[in-house]
Each structure stands twice: as C-alpha cells, then as structure tokens.
Amino acid sequence: MSEKRWIYRPIPESPEELLAVENLTRDLKVSPFMAMLLVQRGVYNFDQARTYFRPELPHLHDPFQMKDMDKAVQRLQMAMVREEKILIYGDYDVDGTTSVALFYGFMKTIYSNLDYYIPDRYKEGYGISAQGIEWAAENGFSLIVSLDCGIKSIERVEEAWEKGIEFIICDHHRPGAELPKAVAVLDPKRSDCEYPCKDLTGCGVGFKLLQALCLFRGIPLEQLYDFLDLLAISIASDIVPITGENRVLAYYGLKKLNSTPGFGVQALIKIAGFNSTLDITNVVFGLGPRINAAGRIKHAKAAVQLLLAESEQEATDFAFEINEHNNSRRQYDTSITEQALAMIQSDEWLLNAKSTVLFNNTWHKGVIGIVASRCIEKYHRPTIILTESHNRAAGSARSVPGFDVYEAIEECAELLEQFGGHTFAAGLTLKLENIKAFQQKFEEVVTRRILEEQLIPMIEIDMELDLDAIDQKFYNVLKQMSPFGPQNMAPVFSTSDVYLVGEPYIMKEKHLKITVQQAGSYKRFTAIGFNMAHHALFLRRDQPFSICYQIEENNYNGNKSLQLYLKDIKATVGAEQ
C-alpha cells in the first residue's frame, strides 16, 4: 500500500526530558503529548516555552556580533556623510529581489543618492556581473552593497576596486577558500564569524546591516520593522530553518504581511487569490513563485518594482504583469518536466542510476530548478537539469533529505567552470563537451556517498497518537507552534488500528476522502488525502490500517471542525523506529 519510510523522531525518554515533560504539562496546563512535542523541539521549561510561543523582536541578536559588521556600518555611514552614490545590487531570485526591495526601500527613507541593480538572469548570470560593474562605473557609483550574492565574486570585486568602486557584501552562501577584496564581507557562514544564527537568508543579512545602521545612527527600529513582510517572504521562499532568530523574524514578518503589507505584497496576495490568513506554506507556494517568475521569464527588476510600488494602482499593474510571467512559467514547467521524465523512462541506464543528470539545449533556463524538483518527486534521487546558455551548459541541482548535493558537485569541480549553493540546492556551469563526463562522475560520487535509505521517500513522524487525544484545545495549542518550516515543521502523527467508516469517496478522480475511527474509540474524523485515490483499492471496512497525518481545521460555511490531512496509509504499521 505504501513504499514510503515512516521515520519516528526520538520521543523524550532521558530523566531530564521526562522531567521537562512533567513540568511543562503542569506549568503550561497542556497534555503530555503537547509537552513531548515541545521537548522534541528543544523547549524544556516555562521560560523557553514563552520565548517559543511568544517571540519578541528584542530577542534578535546584536548585529555587531557578525564579523565585519562594524566595518560595513562605518563605510555606509561615510558614504552617506560624503553623499556618495550607493548602488544596491541583488540576485534575481526571491531572496535577492526581496533583499533589494527591503534594503533600498528602507535606505530611501533616510538617504536619497542611491539606486538598485538586478542582473539579467540570461545575459549576465548569477553573482556580480561584469556588466553590472561597468554600469556602476559609468553612472558614478563609488559603493556597492551586494545582497544574496558576491561571496565568490573574487575577480569582479577586484575589477570594481580597480575602477574606484568599493563593496560591502551581504551573502549567506558558503564561502570559498578566498574571500573577495571588499570593505566588509558579511556572511554568517564564514568560518571566522561567530554570529549565532548561521541560517539567515541573504535578505536577513541585509536586514542585520540595516539594524546595525539604525543602532549606530539612533534611528528607531520600528522604521525598519515596517519592511518585515519582505523578510518573511525571503525566509519562507529560501527554505531556511524557522528557528531562533529566523523564527522571530518570520513570526513578525507574517504578522505584518497579514495586517498592513506594502502595496506590492498586498497586490500579490490579491492576485494569488488568498482571502484568509497566510502562513509560511502559502508564501512558499503562492507568493514566492510569482516573484521568482519575473526573473525566470523576463527580468527580475519587475519584481522589485512591484515590491517597492508606492500606490495601489502601480502595484496592481506590476502584479498583473508578474502573474502573466508566472502563467508562462507554469507552461514551461509542465512541458519540460514531461520531456525530462520521458528521457529517464526511455533510458535503462538512467532508470537504474542513483542520480539524474539531464541535458537539453532547448530547455528554458528559468525553470530547470523547478524541473529538477519535479523529477525528484517521481524518482527521489539527487538531480541536475542542464540547458545551454552562452555556449555553456548551465544547470540547477536539487537533492533529497540527508544528502549534500553541494559536496557531491564539489567532488566534480575539475569538470566545472563554476558552481555554488547549499546542501539541498546548487547551480553550476560547465563546457558542453564535459556533460557526459560530468554525468558519469556525478553518478560515481553519488553512488559512493549516498545511503540506500536516502533513495526511498520518507515521512518524519513526531509521535504515535490515539485519535481520542485530538480535541479543540490540543489543536489550539498546536496552532501556536507556528510559523512552521524546516526544523519546526507542523507536527505529523500516526495512528494504528484505524478502521474505515462508510465507503471511501474519490474527489476529482485523484483525491481521497474517508471517515476513520480507531478501535475501541467512538471518535470519528474526516481524513483527506491529496493524490491518494489509489489507496481506496486496498481499504476494507473490516481490516485495520495505520495512517500518518497532520491535524487541520476545516471551516465550511462558518462551521469549524477538525480533520486529518493524510500523508500516507499503511496496511500494517511497518514503521521504522
């Protein structure tokens, strides 16, 4: 019935953990199950619970703890005093465009002699471009603040320096062995940086620089907090851990996004069709792709113009344009994914490989990362999709949980011209004649490094739960654990000895709706499984089965009820501990 691995998170069992469960149950007046969920997330006492459930902006770290922050603030201050022209330079993805919109938008409230620059994805590529440096020199800029890029742009920063242009780099990607010759290099992933939060987005690093500038100049931080809706979009879309400082920023960013967002974000929410409170998932799948579509299909500058819009009409116009780009992106995405899957299915070597590397010189460069993710949904293995760009093969890599695709690509460096990225996503370029050799080398590296179980989709489950334990109070506390995201995912539960009540109902020929009841209990719940209609063939009213699920609230015509959002169904428990 299911080929997915059910992996259970360790439940609290040490004396310290059990005492914490007991104390939290008493002090917070919650069920032991809820207390166990908190301990699993590193919450052991009342004070930690208060910080977890009620994040506060004063909990943000001192920005001057970041390496080079003092140098960055001094140089920025000097530029403002001297009335130098400052250029805000950002990447073309969601993190980059929100970074530029936040940094430029705030700086415009205190300084006017500045502009921003977003490189063309196809003509200039990722990172600091020669064209960007040339444009800055021709237009008299003497300081560039780069956001979400620059950490590996050694040569470009050197070229800028020779032209009399200095750099402040705000990045969050892994540095190479050498750092650029910049006035300041802000990157929490620097080996010599002791900043506590290593998982800031590029937008987050830019925010920390502005926070430091505010503290230095005595500017009320509330002026900066007006831009937290943009930072929340960055945090959600870049899939960083929603813990520590990111949790605080996401919490207040979502509050801003759901109450008084800027004109641009407001127009984006409207055109995406949202009319209720947005969470991280809504941002990831509803707002992020639309912002990204501008750079994928045409030019990312339109995304920044949208996010900086100063009137409702201006925002609506840009939102409409970006939505059209997103519709085009979907068409490319669907078509290329079908071609990619067909290539795998028609090649026995690819079918049996432990990695996927595909090349087609006609594929749209703007969607190859999305296509890589789609291929993983089907084949669940490290995947690289390549297309031709400027007589080179340009690619996007995506990985599976537990496998570091960046390190695997790094082992193939002799075949590459450049590469960069993170554990689960990376970009690379190579000569066209090296594609076959790279495909073989990457497969060799993956085969050597990957564990067999990493090639099987898994569902991480927090704990086994009886359906009797689920009630409105339990759900109300569960809701307060948001915002959910990496390292603070919405809790997933499993329940055994579940029986079908009535007959399965198939919706739109692919979704499953059932009513379930656990043996020995009178409680019944509606359970919805998207793309799970095939399970109906195996469900029998007289045969018990196991389910794993998340708990959601269904609001239909004003009537609220709890329902289960199914992740998987097993005929027998068969779970791995």
Image (tube, grey):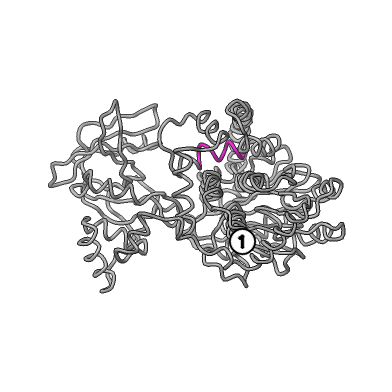
Q: On the rendered image, what quadrant is the C terminus found in?
A: bottom left
Which residue is located at x 51 percent, y 31 percent? 272
Q: Can you say whether 396 is above or below 539 in the image?
A: below
Front residue of 356 and 387: 387
Which picture quadrant has residue 161? bottom right
Relative side of 80 to 219, left or right: right
Q: Can you say whether 61 is above or below 326 in the image?
A: below
Pointer 1: residues within 10 angstroms few (<14), some, or many (20+)? few
Mark 1 residue element: helix
Which residue is located at x 72 percent, y 37 percent? 362
> Is residue 528 part of the magenta span, yes or no?
no
Q: On the rendered image, what quadrant is the N terminus found in?
A: top left
- Counting from the top left corner in percent of width and height, residue 314 is at 63, 28
Is residue 385 at all visible to an observer of this figure? Answer: no
Q: The magenta stretch spans which residues?
A: 284-292
- Tell me which secondary structure the magenta stretch mostly adopts: helix
Which picture quadrant has residue 523? top left
Q: Can you say whether 291 is above or below 327 in the image?
A: below
Is residue 170 at all visible to an observer of this figure? Answer: yes
Residue under label 1: 216
Q: Amino acid at mark 1?
A: Phe
Front residue of 228 and 332: 228
- Counting from the top left corner in percent of width and height, residue 152 is at 72, 60
- Counting from the top left corner in percent of width and height, residue 530 is at 39, 36
Which residue is located at x 21 percent, y 56 percent? 29
Front residue of 373 and 35: 35
> Is residue 285 part of the magenta span, yes or no?
yes
Front residue of 253 and 385: 253
- Counting from the top left corner in percent of width and height, residue 318 is at 63, 30
